[in-house]
Amino acid sequence: AVHGGYRTALERGFVGAKVPLGLKRKRLRVVVTGGAGFVGSHLVDRLIERGDSVIVVDNFFTGRKENLVHHFGNPNFELIRHDVVEPLLLEVDQIYHLACPASPVHYKFNPVKTIISFSQLLLRFAPVLSVHKTNVVGTLNMLGLAKRVGARFLLTSTSEVYGDPLQHPQTETYWGNVNPIGVRSCYDEGKRTAETLTMDYHRGAQVEVRIARIFNTYGPRMCIDDGRVVSNFVAQALRKEALTVYGDGKQTRSFQYVSDLVEGLIKLMEGEHVGPFNLGNPGEFTMLELAKVVQDTIDPDAKIEFRPNTADDPHKRKPDITRAKELLGWEPKISLREGLPLMVSDFRKRIFGDHSEVDL
Ligand code: NAD
Ligand code: UDP
Ligand code: UDP
């Protein structure tokens, strides 16, 4: 049943093994669901670069072909328009399961806007259903696929499983503090269910699984208007608009540059440990501090505008990454002040069509 699958790959002796430079490494067949999105497209770049054969499965809900266009025509790259809520038959060695609408405006009602039209209402609630369905049915399908072909499966979970945490910083052993019926629940509880399914397939069907709990990540190719704080502030500063700080701006997040995350995901997939592993940068910032970094990087005269905060907003978030350091030999290398300018160049180019600065 596992012919051509992951165990065969293991027998061939290259999975997880360190391949000395200069020696030819056998080609893995890797699926990246959500590979047309922000994190997924950077992961695909790295996998293609190291010689793997990559199949991206994406329904383009938030992803874009532009993120992958540089691989079109490469025989080792394939792009399938498909919704993971529907079953999928493929023969592969590894599955990176990223597909999920990940930005808050795609999954929650925004109380800052009080008057909304019926069509806006539809737009707001349809994605809520699709988030939960993607997390539950989509993850189930990809686990079913992993089971059938004997592939190794990696779930990109989230620090949101910790909810509004009562432990700080958060370790993987913390069970979290999540409101099951709030506006964020489709995402938080959806990912918690996805983790449960992943562990059930591991224990019940011996699927080889890996779980990453990703903390706030930023970098080139983020959706410009998806409502996340770093993309909002950067786009606002570039457009000479005020930076919108929600609440009192004293809530904290810890921001990780995307290349650090991609390295962590690959180390996790190739390593021997199931996890879950926190993948994040422990550098913690209040939203006001983040606004200051954006001002210093883009425009010291950028104004700040306070807005009411959204419901159930976690007060603080910071990863304890001891486990990833010890078991994966991973830690982030790029600080916010180093990473932000790289994202700014990309945003400047996309907002103003300025091609002079950045080469992705
Ligand atoms: P993104 O929105 O850029 O990428 C998600 C991709 O999934 C998009 O290309 C989208 O079109 C695709 N997708 C959504 N629903 C789908 C479906 N039903 N079928 C097929 N494709 C579908 O988001 P991202 O920031 O790149 O996030 C990638 C993963 O990492 C997500 O699972 C997210 O939950 C997780 N994560 C991200 C962050 C972060 O800060 N970026 C933090 C924690 C967890
Ligand atoms: N599945 C899939 N691709 C496969 C194998 C399974 O999409 O190659 C889907 C399948 O349609 C099912 C889910 O994965 O909805 C779970 O599959 P599993 O075999 O674990 O459960 P069962 O089909 O026995 O309920
Ligand atoms: N936030 C903000 N201004 C914005 C967007 C978000 O102050 O324009 C705040 C938001 O209230 C939250 C933090 O920034 O406290 C991080 O929000 P984001 O949606 O980026 O990530 P998440 O809440 O999922 O960690």
Image (tube, rainbow, N blue to C red):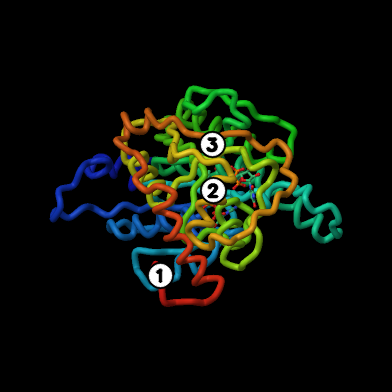
Q: Answer with mark 3 or mark 1, whichever residue precedes in sequence.
A: 3
Q: Quadrant of the N terminus?
A: top left
Q: Residue 352 sits in which quadrant? A: bottom right
Percent of width and height locating residue 317:
54, 34
Cβ of mark 3 under 8 A from ligand 1: yes
Q: Amino acid type of disc 1?
A: Val
Check disc 3 and report the residue beneath it. Answer: 159
Is 146 located above or below residue 352 in the figure?
Answer: above
Residue 5 at least partly seen: no
Left-right relation of 178 to 323: right
Left-right relation of 180 to 150: right
Q: Answer with mark 1 or mark 2, whichever residue precedes in sequence.
A: 2
Cβ of mark 2 under 8 A from ligand 3: yes
Is 277 located above or below residue 70 in the figure?
Answer: above
Q: Nearer the viewer, residue 344 or 109?
A: 344
Q: Quadrant of ligand 2?
A: top right
Is 175 located above or below residue 62 in the figure?
Answer: above
Q: How far apart are the alpha carbons under marks 3 and 1?
A: 30 Å
Q: How far apart are the alpha carbons under marks 1 and 2?
A: 23 Å
The disc label shown at residue 155, or none: none
